[in-house]
Image (spheres, rainbow, N blue to C red):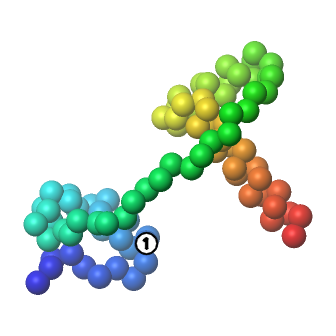
Amino acid sequence: MSRIPEFKDVKEMAEFWDTHSSADYWKEMEESDDTFTRPTLKPLSIRIEQSMFRKVKSLARKKGLTYNAYIRLLLAEGLERDMREVK
């Protein structure tokens, strides 16, 4: 019988794994057959002011991201927000 509880939602699961080590449950885990594919990225060139670029790099570093990933994150968040406003 598994000592890993059944979770009612992702929040409950996250709280459990935040306070427990997966190493303690290693023998109870099953291998996943999930596959992850990276989305195809379209190269894009934009010109921004040097001061803005420094800010982007600084904030990206604080978040543990590359500046490219951080710009994609900002763009995705902005698009989602604008799409909700348009509806």
Q: How many marks?
A: 1
Q: Relative to 46, does residue 36 appear above or below in the rendering?
A: below
Between 65 and 44, the one lying in front of the other is: 44
Q: Quadrant of the C terminus?
A: bottom right
Q: Relative to 31, does residue 62 appear above or below in the rendering?
A: above
Residue at 75% x, 27% y is 45
Q: Quadrant of the N terminus?
A: bottom left
Q: Position of residue 78 (x, y in %)?
A: 76, 50
Residue at 73% x, 32% y is 44
Pick out the residue farthest to the right: 86
Q: Relative to 74, does residue 60 appear above or below in the rendering?
A: above
Q: Where is residue 65 in the image (x, y as percent from the top left)?
A: 52, 35
Q: Quadrant of residue 84?
A: bottom right
Give the residue number, with chain letter if any, for mark 1. 10
Q: Position of residue 4 (x, y in %)?
A: 21, 75
Residue at 66% x, 28% y is 56
- Tag 1, which secondary structure? helix
Q: Quadrant of residue 35?
A: bottom left
Q: Relative to 68, does residue 15 appear above or below in the rendering?
A: below
Q: What residue type is labelled 1?
A: Val
Q: Is residue 15 visible?
A: no
Side of 26 relative to 51 (left or right): left
Q: Quadrant of residue 53?
A: top right
How packed is label 1: few (under 14 Cα within 10 Å), some, or many (20 or more)? Answer: few
Residue at 29% x, 82% y is 6
